[in-house]
Image (cartoon, rainbow, N blue to C red):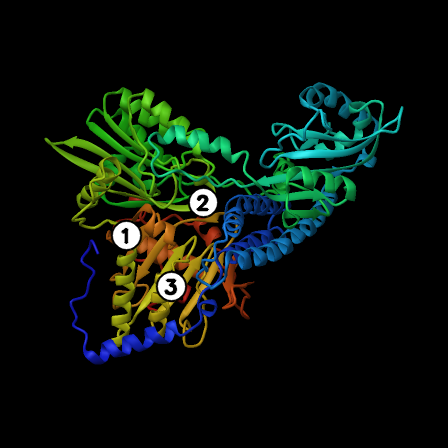
Amino acid sequence: MADGGKTNAIETTAEVADKLSVVQAIKAFPAGDRFLNRELSWLQFNLRVLEEAENPRHPLLERLRFLSISGNNLDEFYMVRVAGLRAQCDAGVEILSDDGLTPLQQLTQVNILAEKLMKKQQQVWASLTSELRNEGIWVLTASEVSQSEFEWIRSYFYDNILPVLTPIAVDPAHPFPFIPNLGFTLGMSLKRERDGESMVALLPVPNHLQRFLRLPDSGETRFISLERVLTMFLDELFPGYKVKGSGVFRVIRDSDIEIEEEAEDLVRVFESALKRRKRGRVIRLKVEKGMSKALRKNIFTRLGADDDVVVMVDGILGVNETTQLIVDDRPDLLFTPYHPRYPERVRDFSGDIFKAIAAKDFVVHHPYESFEVVHLFLRQAARDPDVVAIKQTLYRAGAQSMIIGALIEASEAGKAVTAVVELKARFDEEQNIKWARDLERAGVHVVFGSIELKTHGKVSMVVRREKGKLLSYMHFGTGNYHPVTAKIYTDLSFFTADQALARDANKMFNYLTGYIEPLGLEKLVLSPFSLRDSLMELIDREIEFAQAGKPAAIWVKLNSLLDSKIIDKLYEASQNNVKIELIIRGICTLRPGIKGLSENIHVRSIVGRFLEHARICCFGNGHGLPSRQAKVFISSADWMPRNLNRRVETLVPIENPTVHDQIMGQVMAANLKDNDQTWVMNSDGSFEKYELEEDEETFSAHHYFMNNSSLSGRGSAIGENAPIMPLMAYGLENS
C-alpha cells in the first residue's frame, strides 16, 4: 500500500496452516452457494426502488417518480446487460458467471424476475393513478374527455402534432421502416372502404413530443396520453380507411458500444459507434396487450424480433415517461424543497477557497451541502493570477456545466489547463464529445485516456504560486462533476492541500496524458495498479488483529460489491471473527449470514429520497470501530472487477482528525443507524425492509443530514477541537 500498510509480522507454520484451512473451507462451498448472480442482484435493487413507489410515507408525486426511475433503470438494464447476455448466447459462449450459470441460464432467470418486476410496475401504476384521481390529478381515457376539452385537443393536435407525424403504409412499395431505440409507435390494421383491401400502417411518434398533454385548467389537473390522442383522430389520419385494430409498441435495442483497440481517433470512432447504437438489434419489444394477434405477428416478423424478447403489457408502455405527470403546482404532493447549506468554513475566509483549504482539510457532503463550493474552487482558480495550472478529470459533467466554463475561462486567461475527458461514459458520450471540442477550441489540452481503461477517478488539481514556490490544492470526489446529480446523489467532496497527495495525483495525470506509470506513490492508491491488492492487505490486517485477540472490524459503503477475490477475502475475515458491516446500495453478490462462511457479515441497502453514491471504507486497525485510530478512505471505485481491473480509480486516505471523525463517526455511523429507509439482505439475495424493534425510535440518515451540519465544514461555528459525533446515541461504540 501507498501508506505502508503491510505488516512485518512473520507467520508461523501453524498460523499458515490455520489460514489455509479457512481458505480451503471457503473454497469448498459451491460457486452458487458462495456468490449471487450479478444480474439478478441488480433486479432486486430495482425492486427496492419500485417498493418506494408504494411507500405511503413519501408524497404521492414522489412515489410516481420512484416508479418512473424503476422504468428508466429497467430500460438501461436491457439495453446493456441483457443485450450482452444475448450476444453471448448467440455466440455460443459457455463461460460461467461467478455463481456458476451459463449466459443462457442467466438470461432465462433474468427474464423471469424482470417479468415479475414489470407486472408490479403496472400494478403500482394502476394504484397510483387511482390515488392521483383522489387528489384531483387525472390521466383520462378518451371517453372521459369533455366536449370543450375535445375541441382544445383537436386544435392542439392540428397545430402541434399532425405536422410532425408521418403515417406509413407497410406494403411492397413501402418497406417496414426502421424503429429507433426506445421508439414509440402506433400500429394499425386498416381496411379500405371502397374495395375492402386490408393494409397495415404505422404511426411512429417523434421523440420530442410530450407523452402526456396537460389540458386547460378546469379546477383539476387533467392529462391525456399521446397515444389516446392519436387514436381519437385515426379516421382523419387515414381518410377512406376503417381502423380494424390498433395498439402501441415500444422497441428497446442493444445500446452497448464496442470499440476496436487499434482505433486511432477516439472521437471519430465514438461518433460512428453512437450512430450504430441507434440501430442495434431488438432486445425487448413491449406491446400493448389489446393489439390483435394478426397485427402483433406482422410487426414481430418485420422487426425480426424473437419470441422470447416480446412482452405483452397490460397497462402503460414507457413507465419512465410518467415523470411528466409530476407537476410543480402541487407542492403538497412533493418533498418539501431542500436547499443545500453552504459550508461555514469557506465563509470564515470570506469565500477564499484556497485560504480555507490551506487552513485545514475539509469535506463537503452533497447534496446536503452545496456543490457551489466545487464550482468556486475552479472558478476562483480560473481568475486567480497566482494560479498557473489546472488538471481535471471529467467523466460526467452534465449539459449545463459551470466546470467546463471555468476550465475554458482559465485557458483563455493563459493558464495551463489539462482536461482528461472520458468518452466511454455510457449514454453521456455525445455530451462529452461536445465538451471536448469546446475545450480544445479554447486552448485546453484535452486527452481521452486510453482504449483499454476508463478514467473514472474524480480529481481536480490546482497549482498555485505562493511565496516563490508552487503549491497544489486538490479536490477528490466520490461522485461526478455534475451539478444536477449533485442535488440528488449523496457524495463527498474532499478538499486538501496535502502535498503528498498532490504529488501522487500529478503522477496519475502524467499516466493519463503520457502513459508514465505512477511509481512510488506516497498516499494515493490507484487502480488498475494496486487498489485491489491494497484492499486485500487492509482486510488481511484486520484478520491478523482478530487472530491476536484484538478488536477487528470493517465498515464499507459502496454502490456495488461483486469482485469475487475481495468477497472471498471478506469471507475469510468473517471466519476469523472480524465484524463486517456493508452498506451496498445496488448489486451485491456476497451472501451474508451463512454458517461456516459469512456469519459475521451483515449487508444493508438504503433507498430513499436521495441516491446513495459515496464510496467509503473504514478498517478498525486493531481498535475496532468507531475509533480515532481507524484507517478511513474515500474512493471513486466500487468493488467490481471493471473498477479494479479496467478503470483508473482513486482510494484516498483520510488523515485529518476532523474529516476522519466526520466520515466515520457521522456519515458511516448515521448510515448504520438508519432504520427508516434500510433494507436488510438475506443470504438468498432477497431483501426485507428493516422492522423496528419494540420502543425503537425511527432514525433516517437522510433526515439527519438535512438537519445537521457536517463536522469538518463548520469552521468557527463549531471550533477546531469539537468532539467526535456522539456515537453512543447510535449504539455503535467500539464494535
Which quadrant of the rendered structure holds the N terminus?
Answer: bottom left
* Residue for badge 3: 567
Please, is residue 264 above or below residue 291 in the view? above
Question: Would you say 169 lies left or right of 196 here?
Answer: left
Please, is residue 581 above or below residue 205 in the view? below
Check if mark 1's residue and mark 3's residue have beta carbons within 8 Å: no
What's under tag 3, amino acid-wise?
Answer: Ile
Tell which of 575 and 720 is nearer to you. 575
Q: Nearer the viewer, mark 1 or mark 2?
A: 2
What's under tag 2, amino acid-wise?
Answer: Tyr
Neighbour tally class for label 3: few under 14, some 14-19, many 20 plus, Cα within 10 Å: many
Which quadrant of the rendered structure holds the C terminus?
Answer: bottom left
**Residue at figure coordinates x 55%, y 66% from the top left:** 691
What's under tag 1, amino acid-wise?
Answer: Thr
Q: Nearer the viewer, mark 3 or mark 2?
A: 3
**Residue 138 shows in the view:** no
The numbered mark at residue 658 is: 1
Q: CA distance from mark 1 to mark 3?
A: 31 Å
Q: CA distance from mark 1 to mark 2?
A: 23 Å
Quadrant assignment, res 136: top right
Q: Earlier in the sequence, mark 1 or mark 3?
A: 3
**Residue at figure coordinates x 18%, y 58% from the top left:** 4
What SS does tag 1 mark? helix
Please, is residue 15 above or below residue 320 in the view? below
Quadrant assignment, res 451: top left
Q: Earlier in the sequence, mark 3 or mark 2?
A: 2
**Residue 632 shows in the view:** yes
What SS does tag 2 mark? strand
